Image (cartoon, grey):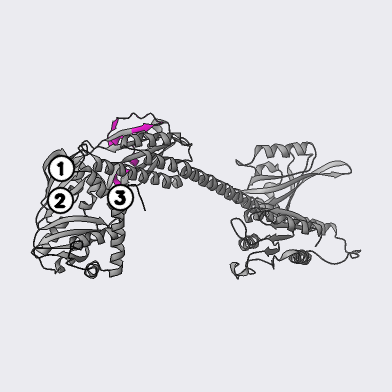
Amino acid sequence: MPGSRALLVHPEDGADRITSALDEAGFDVTTVHTATAAVAKVTTGEYDCVVSEYALPGDDGVALAGAIEESDARVPVVMFTATEGEAIPETVFEGGVDKFLHKNGSASIDRLVADVSAVCSSEAASGSQRDITGHEPSKGDIARAVSEAPVGLSLSDPELTDYPLVYVNDAWEDHTGYPIEEALGRNPRFLQGPGTDPETVERLSQAIQNEEQLTVEIRNYRRDGTPFWNELTVAPVYDDGELAHYVGFQNDVTDRKTAERLAEERAEKLATERRALDRVLGRVNGLLSEISRILVEGRDAETIAERVCEEIADEPGYMGGWIGEVSSATGRLEITAASGVPVTIGSSFALDETPIEVQRAIETDEVQGCVAGRGSDKELGPQTVGGARLLVVPITYGHRRYGLLGIYSSEGDALDRRERKVCESVGKMIANGLHSVETTRILTTDRVVELCVTISDPSFTLSQIADAVDTSVEHLGTTRLDDDACELYLRATGVSDDYTAVKELPFVNSVRPVSETNEDITFAVTATESPPLARIAEHGGVVVAVTAEASSAELTIEAPPEQDVRGILDVFRAEYVNVELRSRVERESRDRSLTEFAAAVDDRLTDRQRSALKTAELNGYFEWPRPVDGSEIAERMGITRQTFHQHLRAAERKLVEAYVDPRSRD
């Protein structure tokens, strides 16, 4: 009804039109934009009606109606929404909504004004003024009403020293927990405690001295020590112009204050989340893009490491960082690059001298972090360099660990759980870049180290296959299918095409024939896990040849002269016993242009195209006359003849492009 107070809960967009319509109808309208703010307002008991949109930031209108109902505010809720019915819960009216109306132009706004008026009218007291002569309350009635009123009421006598209480009603006793006999004769300040605001106490004192009425919200304490919020109104009472008493009206508003505090905490939490997301987006747009550029432009690992550390030091909120490697010879962490922090390049640290997070990052290959003041006074800890936090990021490509990246924050809220994901991506990017540089160096080096390695362990993958086919096998190549599986191309002499024993090996998923001659047979084994053989490239080596028997295998591996041979051997020693380096010979590289060409072609082919090309070549498909046709090869690959030819034509096209125009790319 006109003159009632309405609370409009609506997003900023579109709220003005509704506010204007209700204003014109005579309503006193207050507008908020979130359900949280609305709950805090409603609990004050100052509104006759709530008008709410369903779609609100955060909690929706139905959740708001439920919260109002649970708060016992008893304020009717009218939902006025543009949201279609299917998107709104069927229990909308069970959730505390009194009226429901869809937005549909000006006519619906007129209907809204009518509905709000009807709701407020039903809530307001009705009836005309009546003659009450003879029904005036007696002094006893008034005394009983004061005594039994739900609002705490007290009287203090200013003629007595320290203005003691001379009267309190039952509600005052209920609110405070103090029996009346313990309260009378004492100044009401005994309700104060350690959480009472001194400024509020001073305002009350000044108001009493100046004989002024004052309403405050003050933190008081019950007899059992429980704190509560007291909405206290103090006013002077006069008798024939003389100050007779001070009356105090007390209302327990703890629930409302709690709701307001929760609303403020929620708003602050949302603001903190928003700031954190903005910071993470800034890292993505800034740090990740700059490091991507560094990796694209980088030509050697040293330069990449230096520039990455410099970029981290320039990033807002970050103090600086370092990159280090764990020496396979000494087991110590050796710093190879640093910027922005007092860490010397070339310095070496025993792992037990560094924070435990450094050791955990090495053991788990997962990002680890620590803050200053929590055991961070060890070497490289945030406390020793003046930083707020340290994040230790593994730089790992597959099974190859290139080192660790340490990042220090200069701000306490930087390097939180969200930024850890960004830093984890940084570590992977650096590892990919270093692997690319290392691979390029392997392919373009003028000299190589040729390693002859023997593995005398029957559990070696190819030795198990050799044992299954009861003859030696020769490794022709490996195709990675995903992070775990791979396809091994093998040649054996004097065996049948029965691969039952091979299929029964625990790591074998499938076996298929590739080609067969009078002397030997070539077959492909799909392994469910990648053997160490397929991971040598991650450690800077190239497998040139492998021959395996049931009890031993001989491998020839090429690597750049500066490559850490121990790291390559450790790949095998981690899984097999009796791994021996038989010889290490440095010599001129094989024809580099041919190697580069082969690498370029291999980089362009998909797994299926590479498989089709290799299977066709091993079966003599490119000879004339052809000993096999496309159907036979397709059958061996487990695909249709049409699919085989599609893969083969695509592979041939890329092969020709790599020869005619090496700069071309798909």
Give coordinates of residue 190: x percent, y percent. Answer: 66, 42
> Disc 3, disc 2: CB below 8 Å?
no
Residue that badge 2 annotates: 545
Q: Which residue appears at 66% of the width and 54% of the height?
A: 33
**SS of the residue under disc 3:** helix
Residue 647 drawn in magenta: no
The quarter of the picture where the N terminus appears is bottom right
Q: Nearer the viewer, residue 175 or 301?
A: 301
Label 3 – label 2 distance at C-alpha: 30 Å
Numbered disc 2: secondary structure: strand
Classify 10 Å Cα crowding around label 1: few (below 14), some (14-19), many (20 and above): many
Q: Nearer the viewer, mark 1 or mark 3?
A: 3
The dot on residue 660 is: 3
Residue at image coords 71%, 53%:
31
- Measured from the top left, where is residue 649 in percent x and y? 30, 61
What amino acid is found at the position of numbered circle 3 in the picture?
Answer: Val
Q: Which residue is mark 1?
A: 450
Frontmost of labels 3 and 2 is: 3
Q: Which region is colored magenta?
A: 337-364
Q: Is residue 657 left or right of residue 139?
A: left
Q: Which mark is residue 466?
A: none
Where residue 560 sits: x, y (%)?
A: 21, 40
| Cα separation between marks 2 and 1 | 11 Å
Question: Could you say which quadrant of the image residue 61 lies in?
Answer: bottom right
